[in-house]
Image (cartoon, helix red, strand yellow):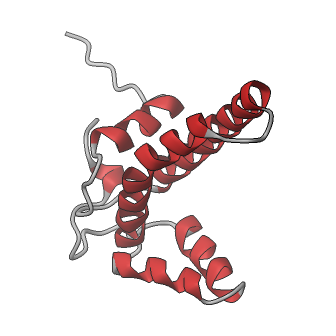
Amino acid sequence: MNEQITEKGAFQYFLDVFKKYAVFQGRAGRKEFWFFALFNFIIVLCLEILDWAIFKNTIIPFAVIYDLAAFIPGLAVSFRRLHDIGKSGWWILINLIPIIGFILYIVYLATDGMPEDNMYGANPKNEKE
């Protein structure tokens, strides 16, 4: 049999984050985090436009409902992303430092993960899909 290795599609990374709804352990690669962030942004933008079109800027129920549903998976994938670079997930609190904290947080999220296994698990690039 000819076994073919296929790369995940971008939207599959987004769906995988929801499959790991509240999993704060382990590691998440850059693709998993940034594709989740991209599709999350697109969905929220579309829902806010829909809310504005239907409710004329008075209430935004669709976007708020989605935001509530995506909050825990977004937090979990952020923790796993920080684990990938060898940092505790609690480094997310660096965002509380105005401007500098957010910039440093984005740098951490964009940094390539540790190539070797670390205390949070195996390198997600080496795992079979």
Residue 71: image location, x then y, percent: 44, 54
Q: Residue at x 29, y 38 (%)?
A: 19
Residue 24's spot in the image, x, y percent?
A: 27, 62
Which residue is painted at 21% across and 65% down in the image? Answer: 121
Q: Residue at x 58, y 38 (%)?
A: 61
Please tell me which residue lies in front, 32 or 124. Answer: 32
Q: Is residue 10 left or right of residue 1?
A: right
Q: Quadrant of residue 118?
A: bottom left
Q: How many marks?
A: 0
The N terminus sits in image quarter: top left
Q: Position of residue 18 (x, y in %)?
A: 35, 40
Vertically, is 14 above or below 109? above
Toward the front, the furthest residue is 58
| Left or right side of 1 for 76 | right
Which part of the image, by quadrant, shows the C terminus? top left
Q: Is residue 47 visible?
A: yes
Viewer-side residue, 8 vs 22: 22
User: Relative to the observer, which residue lies in front, 51 or 20?
Assistant: 51
Residue shown at 32% from the left, 54% from the top: 124
Could you say where residue 32 lies in the image, as x and y percent from the top left? Answer: 45, 48
Residue 114, relative to residue 70: is it above or below?
below
Q: Is residue 49 left or right of residue 6?
A: right
Does the image show residue 86? no
Judge whether 52 appears above or below 89 on screen: above
Q: Quadrant of residue 120?
A: bottom left
- Vertical position of residue 45 compared to residue 71: above or below: above
